[in-house]
Image: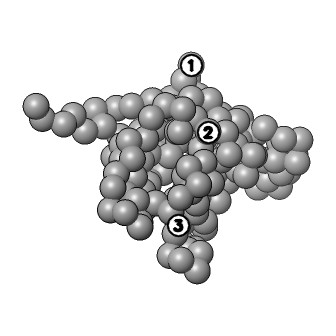
Amino acid sequence: MTEVKSNIELCFGLPSTEKCEKNVNDICIRYGYTYEEVRIIEFRAMFETLMKFRNDEGSTFTELFFISVLGERVTGPTVTYGTYDLNGNTYPKLIYHGEYLEKVNTNGRIFINDEIINKVGQHMESLFEFEFVESRRVKQ
């Protein structure tokens, strides 16, 4: 049987804290952008900045979320930034290009099930200060 490959999308929504909301509104006023434009720009800039860094063991910030949830070192699939539309509005999302993590010490694999990815999404919400709306699997 052939393994069906899917991407995992983590969909985010509006700012989840007053601080983030105020920051978005201040930028709108200062530079004349729309609220939607600023949400997208801010989320993307944060993601791109964080993707530049690795910890001392070489883990990316997205892998650190999985390590936190699972309690073991893993490497994850490539992650990219994207957007999705809902009710005429555009929102940010992160796309994991694959459904498996690789165990660093034992060479095994871990399927990224819904429980794992939703915990990761909730952790990201607290860091990014953007509401984690849902995760979904999209066949490649």
Q: Please state, as top left, top right, bottom left or bottom right, where the N terminus lies in the image.
A: top left
- Vertically, is 24 above or below 45? above
For label 1, the residue is: 87
Mark toward the start of the polypeptide (2 vs 1): 1
Q: How crowded is mark 2: few (under 14 residues within 10 Å), some or many (20 or more)?
A: some
Give the residue at x 46% y 60%. Answer: 74
Left or right of 86 in this view: 113: left
- Give the Cα separation between the discs numbered 1 and 3: 33 Å
Q: Farthest residue to the bottom: give it.
A: 56
Where does residue 58 sit, x and y in percent of width and height?
50, 76
Up/down of 130 relative to 88, above or below: below
> For the residues carrying marks 2 and 1, which lies nearer the camera in this image?
2
Badge 3: residue crowd in 10 Å (few <14, some 14–19, many ≥20): some
- Rendered residue at 32%/62% (across/down): 107
What amino acid does circle 3 point to?
A: Thr
Of circles 2 and 3, which is in front?
2
The residue under label 3 is 60
Gap between marks 2 and 3 measured at Cα: 17 Å
Q: Is residue 69 above or below residue 35?
A: below
The residue tagged 2 is 119
User: Which tag, 1 or 3, sits closer to the chain's start?
Assistant: 3
Which amino acid is tagged 1? Asn
Q: What element carries label 1?
A: loop
The residue drawn where x is 52% and y is 39% is 117
Q: Distance between the residues labelled 2 and 1?
A: 26 Å
Residues at circles 2 and 3 in contact by the CB criterion of under 8 Å: no
Outermost residue on the front side: it is 106
